[in-house]
Amino acid sequence: MVLVTWVFKVIYSSRKSGFRYSRELSKKPNYQSIFVQKVYYKIYKPFQVLSQFTPEIPGQATLADLFDFPKDVYPVGRLDNDSEGLLLLTNDKNVNAKLLNPKWQHSRTYWVQVDGAPKAADLDPIREGMTIRVRKKEIHTLPAKAFLLENAPELPERVPPIRVRKNIPTTWLSLTLQEGKNRQVRRMTAGIGFPTLRLVRYAIEGISIAGMQSGSVESIDKALFYRLLKLDRM
C-alpha cells in the first residue's frame, strides 16, 4: 500500500482576502530506510581471514565463511589478514560515521606478541608518540597506553602457530591506541626494535573478545552496543 501524506499549509496574505489555503503533495518518505531492522555483531576474526565478504583471489577465506550475515551488514573498520581478534559488523550507518571518525578517538586495545624481551622503558616511544612511515609518509602517532604482560594471555591457538626460534624469547604487550593507521601496531613495535609475531585486537572500548573462540560470532543488543562503545554519549 502506498502511503501518501497530504500537507496543509496556511499561507497568510496581506491582501484583503485574508487567509488563503493551499494543499500540496509532500515527497514520499524512504520507508525502507526507516523500517530496516538494525543488527549488531561482534566476531573473533581468525588469522588469514579477510575482513570482507568477497575474496581478492580464489580460495581466500572471508567473513562469509564464518556466518550467514544479512546482505546489508558490513564490517566497521577492518583487521589485516594476518591479524586476529575483535571485528564489529552492523548495517547501522550511524555506527560507521561515529566510530571511524578520528575526532572521537575510541580506544582500541591490542595484545601483541613480539620477538625479543623488551623492558618497560623500551615502550616509552609508544607511550609518548613516535614517528612511523605509512604509505611513504611520516606520521607521528598519538600517545598510547603500553605495558608488558607478565603472562601470555589466554587465547585460542593460532592456526598456523607462529614460528618459534630457539634461544630467542617472545614477550606479550598490551597496547591501547586512540587511532588506527595502516599496520600501525606492527610499525610501532618494529620501530622500537621488537617486531610483531602475533597481533590480536582484544577490545574496542567496552566490547571485547573475552570468552570467545576464534571464528565465533555473537549478536549484541543495540542499546548495549551503543553503551559499550560510548556512542550514546555523542
Image: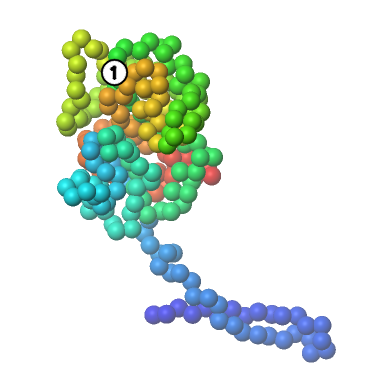
Image quadrant holding the N terminus, namely bottom left
Residue 46, x across and y down, in percent: 23, 37
Query: What amino acid type should be assigned to the residue bearing mark 1?
Result: Asp
What colouring method underlies this structural image? rainbow
Image quadrant holding the C terminus, namely top right
Q: Which quadrant would residue 202 be assigned to in this image?
A: top left
Residue at 49% in and 31% down:
139
Disc 1 packing (10 Å; few <14; some 14–19; many ≥20) = many
Which residue is more in the foreground, 114 or 36? 114
Q: Is residue 80 left or right of residue 129?
A: left
Residue 98, x across and y down, in percent: 48, 46
Give the structural element (helix, strand or loop) at label 1.
strand
Question: Taking the image as drawn, is residue 138 in sight?
Answer: yes
Which residue is more in the foreground, 214 or 60? 60
Q: Is residue 139 left or right of residue 66?
A: right
Q: Is residue 85 left or right of residue 103?
A: left
Location of residue 223 with respect to 22 vertically, above or below? above
Residue 194, x across and y down, in percent: 34, 18
Residue 172, x across and y down, in percent: 31, 19
Reading the image, the residue beneath label 1 is: 115
